[in-house]
Image (spheres, coloured by chain):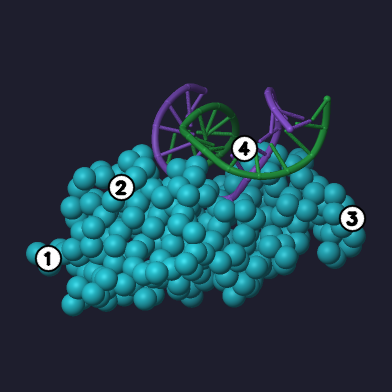
Chain colours: A cyan, B green, C purple
Amino acid sequence: MPELPEAETIIRGLQPLTGQRLGTVEVLYPDVVEEGPALRQGAEGSQIVQVHRRGKNVILDLVQGDGARPSLVVNLGMSGRLLLRPLGDPSPPPTHPGLRASVARLDGTPVGELVYHDPRRFGRIRLLSARAFQAWSETLGPEPLSAHFRSVDLEAGLKRSRSPIRSWLLDQRRIAGVGNIYANEALFLAGIHPETPAAEIPSERVPGLHRALKRVLRDAVAAQGTTLRDYRTAQGWEGSYGTALRVYGRENQPCPQCRTPVVRRVFGNRSAFLCPRCQPEPEVP
DNA sequence: CGTGCCCCCTGTCAGC
DNA sequence: TGCTGACAGGGGGCAC
């Protein structure tokens, strides 16, 4: 579910948490929370000093009473939601709450609760020490919307791999935050067939792919993400990028550029969508 | 090490 | 109407 644009939208909606304090933490799905008791102990009573994102992960930086600064790392899996519910919120409570934390101002005034909701329970919540967080973050590739993500580095990375480019883009160690929807959309914009071996993408096409990735991700952030089914913002709203999708989920519908029917192909255990005319099959030597 | 495959889990929907 | 199977946006583990 949530890829970079969805995680980015969620952290923007969670900014009111900055400077507030976590109260009681309840774990309702133990399998979604790593080290449940330790996490509960570590999070309860700590202050949230920053809410940010790394790839598809939502990060809450905390300060504990003893001055330690661990981070809560939330990976939303396929169906995870992080919902900020103010006191007296009239919307119906989440049906599959996995973790619930009360939220208060520093002076103790309760303001609401933060709920992690996840029917499929593919998501994970971990509490990492500052050192462990650093080490984990270094296992992830560059942030594709940052200036550190350069076309020349993308080109160098692609050259070293014979994976199909769609699979390559999904590997979080290469680029952090790209999932199946936006990989397919960017490959369409770049005119590259998803099964093209990474190393066989000609150098002159790499800047186009680099631009396409940035454009798709930026536009999806502006639209508050893509809601196919489960994804919601922290306020419980749907994202609107679904109507902008060019090929993803549009099997047999006309390509927006040339009207050729969009094709679905399954590889790497996942559906790829493409226009067979705009994204020609790679040449097999 | 890089790569591909399987699986974790529940909900929904198409087809019979 | 009700059942069955396919499928879903992620990622970890394992075998090769």
Instruction: Tell me the chain of label 2.
Output: A
Circles 2 and 1: CB atoms closer than 8 Å: no
Looking at the rendered structure, the secondary structure element under dot 4 is loop
Q: Amino acid at mark 4?
A: Asn
Circles 4 and 1: CB atoms closer than 8 Å: no
Label 2 environment density (alpha carbons within 10 Å; few <14, some 14–19, many ≥20)? some
Q: Nearer the viewer, residue A273 or A80?
A: A80
Residue at 52% over, 48% down: A78
In this rendering, the answer to whether A65 lies above or below B14 is below
| x, y percent for residue A155 | 58, 61
Do badges 4 and 1 share one subunit?
Answer: yes
Looking at the rendered structure, the secondary structure element under dot 2 is strand
Residue under label 4: A269
| x, y percent for residue A151 | 57, 68
State how far apart marks 3 and 2 are (Cα). 50 Å
State how far apart marks 4 and 2 are (Cα). 32 Å
Q: Amino acid at mark 3?
A: Thr
Looking at the rendered structure, the secondary structure element under dot 3 is loop
Looking at the rendered structure, the secondary structure element under dot 1 is loop
Circles 4 and 3: CB atoms closer than 8 Å: no
Residue under label 2: A27
| Residue A238 visible in image | yes
State how far apart marks 4 and 1 are (Cα). 45 Å
Q: Nearer the viewer, residue A83 or A271?
A: A83
In the rendered structure, which disc, 3 or 1, sits on the residue that comes first in sequence?
A: 1
* Number of marks in picture: 4
